[in-house]
């Protein structure tokens, strides 16, 4: 009976066999997706699964740090830069060097064989486990703190210098000097009036998009008093992307309803 | 759980990182591949920390994370700067130093 109580699989094994394949698939997705956003999200998936594996390997502190620092900070930084650099910029798959991809994959397979054979020659059969180390100072975080602020305190101090340098470096690199003076409200108003005087551009705001009985999306154009379409009422970007909505089609239901009302009202009035 | 499984997983992830770094041309994806390789090494450090039963491996993994964070900040700002100058994040276009 006691033999049944011994678990056949441990939590670490479950975590490994669930998270491991997901990680490998997500990592493959990261290098195969053409869009950088998908790659970034795949990498975030890899990192979250890695955090779960850390948790299963007696590293609760690294589990949290992995999620906060890697998934939270680093990957979000990546996503911000993807937004800056352009989400839609698809990369060209033209090879500048003949057979570049094949050679790269072969080189990577070679590196994998090297890694596997090196590590395979020094296989370890069992793990000592971290129960003793973790309990020495009362917990994993306390144990890490004892090492960080004891044995590795100099490295820790050097890290602070590194972080400061990185922050300053990023600010210096990302700084761009303003080449044209900033326009204030007065200057903008002056430009607008000058445009009105010289080019006849109306200084006021442009008309809003059209409101119909069944449509008021920003792609539906407004109608001028004479029934023609006002081109200014829809953003040029939208027109370029999906075209101007057909004003006649949009107002057709209303016209039909009015016509139906007219024919319906005719006999009613006679009855009265 | 036998530690060898983790070694194999880390080797696979590292190899995928190498392929990504060699094959892709978007500077951002190259950078992500480097991050993947760093993560694979972190996995090894944590695994062997458990194998030998001391926490030094976890501290090393922590330092790798700190250095990676600093590296990402500087690297991404370099990518942004290059993008401003060349309007491209494609590493094939960064050939000014050739001439």
Image (spheres, rainbow, N blue to C red):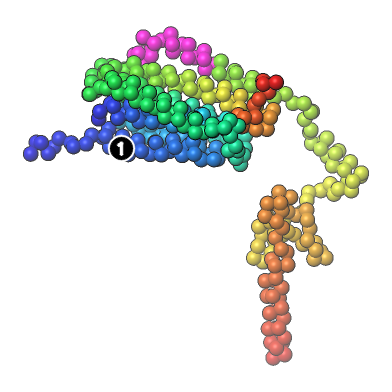
- Quarter-of-image position of residue A99: top right
The disc numbered 1 marks a residue on which chain? A
- Magenta stretch? A145-164
Q: Is residue B50 above or below residue A239?
A: above
Q: Which residue lies at the image location 75% right of the left edge and 59% below the top edge?
A: A222
Query: Which quarter of the figure is the C terminus of chain A placed in?
Result: bottom right
Q: Which residue is mark 1?
A: A17
Q: Is residue A221 above or below residue A134?
A: below
Q: Which residue lies at the image location 71% right of the left edge and 83% below the top edge?
A: A263
Q: Position of residue B47 (x, y in %)?
A: 32, 24
In the picture, measured across the screen, residue A162 lies left or right of residue A192, that is: left
Foreground residue among A72 and A120: A120
In the picture, measured across the screen, residue B33 lies left or right of residue A226, that is: left
Q: Position of residue A58 (x, y in %)?
A: 29, 26
Query: Which quarter of the figure is the N terminus of chain A placed in?
Result: top left
- Quarter-of-image position of residue A223: bottom right
Near mark 1 (Cα within 10 A), the count class, few <14, some 14-19 or many ≥20, is few
Task: Assign the magenta stretch its main secondary structure.
Answer: helix
Q: Position of residue A19 (x, y in %)?
A: 35, 37
Q: Which residue lies at the image location 37% right of the left edge and 26% below the top edge?
A: A113
């Amino acid at each position: 009976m006691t033999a049944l109580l011994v678990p056949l699989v441990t939590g670490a094994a479950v975590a490994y066999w669930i998270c491991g394949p997901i990680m490998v698939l997500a990592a493959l997705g990261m290098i195969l997706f053409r869009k950088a956003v998908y790659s970034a999200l795949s990498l975030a998936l890899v990192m979250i699964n890695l955090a779960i594996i850390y948790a299963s390997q007696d590293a609760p502190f690294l589990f949290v740090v992995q999620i906060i620092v890697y998934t939270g900070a680093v990957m979000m930084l990546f996503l911000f830069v993807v937004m800056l650099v352009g989400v839609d910029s698809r990369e060209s798959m033209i090879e500048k060097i003949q057979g570049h991809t094949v050679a790269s994959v072969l080189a990577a397979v070679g590196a994998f064989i090297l890694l596997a054979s090196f590590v395979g020659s020094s296989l370890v059969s069992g793990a000592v486990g971290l129960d003793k180390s973790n309990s020495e100072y009362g917990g994993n975080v306390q144990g890490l703190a004892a090492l960080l602020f004891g044995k590795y305190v100099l490295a820790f101090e050097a890290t602070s210098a590194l972080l400061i340098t990185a922050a300053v470096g990023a600010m210096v690199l990302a700084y761009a000097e303003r080449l044209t003076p900033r326009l204030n409200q007065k200057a903008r108003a002056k430009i607008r009036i000058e445009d009105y005087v010289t080019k006849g551009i109306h200084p006021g705001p442009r008309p809003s998009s059209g409101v119909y009985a069944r449509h008021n999306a920003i792609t539906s154009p407004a109608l001028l008093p004479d029934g023609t379409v006002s081109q200014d009422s829809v953003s040029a970007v939208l027109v370029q992307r999906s075209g101007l909505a057909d004003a006649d089609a949009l107002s057709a239901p209303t016209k039909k309803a009015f016509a139906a009302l007219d024919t319906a009202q005719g006999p009613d009035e006679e009855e009265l | 759980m036998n530690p060898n499984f983790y070694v194999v997983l880390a080797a696979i992830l590292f190899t995928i990182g190498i392929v990504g770094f060699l094959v892709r041309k978007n500077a951002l994806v190259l950078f992500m591949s480097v991050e993947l390789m760093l993560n694979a090494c972190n996995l090894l450090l944590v695994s062997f920390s458990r194998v030998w039963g001391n926490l030094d491996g976890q501290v090393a993994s922590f330092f790798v994370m700190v250095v990676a964070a600093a590296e990402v900040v500087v690297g991404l700002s370099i990518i942004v700067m290059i993008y401003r100058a060349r309007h491209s994040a494609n590493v094939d276009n960064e050939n000014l130093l050739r001439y």
